[in-house]
Amino acid sequence: MNLCRGLACALVASCALTALAQTSFSSKSSLIDSDSRSITGGAHVQFLFPEQVTLPAGKASAVSLHFKVAPNFHINSHTPHDQFLIPTELKIPASSGVRLEKASYPPGHAFSLPVDPTTKLSVYSGEFSIETHLVAERGNHLIQATLRYQACDNNACMPPKTINVPIDVIGK
């Protein structure tokens, strides 16, 4: 009987610790993902601007989207040198009322890791812009474009991440 109580107490204590750990993790996780536009919110890339653009409806119009990579990190360019590296890519949902006709990504700059200075990577760091040509239907469209990237520092690469790029597009 004492053994059962001992096991029951251990089980209850274990469940309580697990619940506490999950609560701590989920609250921390929700803090990280609460604002994917913020570098301090867990993303390694921040969408800077524009938040709103007015375009002539039905006509391809140039819109420059500005981003910032967190200090001490870099992300693979849109055209990494190795097929196994994840390229940076902007997408706009087909059902958004706005079509991405063309996206011009900046050239990456050459970067070498200290452990292998002979291998050159094509990366973005600091601030960069993606030049787009958008075609908007008439009306107001709050689009949730996305930017997929993989951030790395000098020691490791993080799992690929996709951030929201919210833009209010007004087609007139």
Image: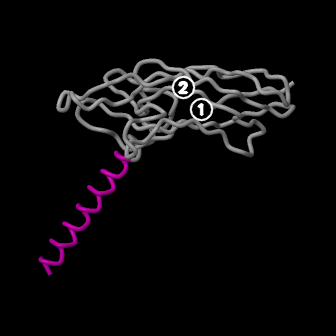
Main SS, magenta residues: helix
The amino acid beneath tag 2 is Phe
Does the magenta-highlighted stretch encompass residue 14?
Answer: yes
Give above or below for 148 relative to 54. Answer: below
Q: Which mark is residue 43?
A: none
The amino acid beneath tag 1 is Val
Q: Residue at x 49, y 26 (%)?
A: 46
Q: Earlier in the sequence, mark 1 or mark 2?
A: 2
Magenta residues, as a range?
1-25
Give above or below for 1 relative to 143. Answer: below
Q: How far across and down, in percent of the image, does residue 56 sit?
A: 84, 23
Colour approach in the figure: one colour
Q: Residue at x 81, y 31 (%)?
A: 140
Q: Residue at x 41, y 35 (%)?
A: 80
Does the magenta-highlighted stretch encompass residue 157?
Answer: no
Badge 1, how many Cα within 10 Å: few under 14, some, many 20+? many
Badge 2, how many Cα within 10 Å: few under 14, some, many 20+? many
| Quarter of the view holding residue 51 | top right
State the separation of the CA atoms marked 1 and 2: 6 Å
Q: In the rendered structure, are the residues bearing label 1 and label 2 in contact, judged by CB atoms less than 8 Å apart?
A: yes
Q: How many marks?
A: 2
- Give whichever of 124, 1 is nearer the camera: 124
Q: In terms of secondary structure, where does tag 2 sit?
A: strand
Q: Is residue 86 left or right of residue 63?
A: left
Point out the image quarter for the N terminus: bottom left
Query: Residue pushed farthest left?
Result: 3
Q: Which mark is residue 47?
A: 2
Which residue is labeled 1 in the image? 165
Give above or below for 145 relative to 60. Answer: below
Q: How far across and down, in percent of the image, does residue 96 sit?
A: 74, 41
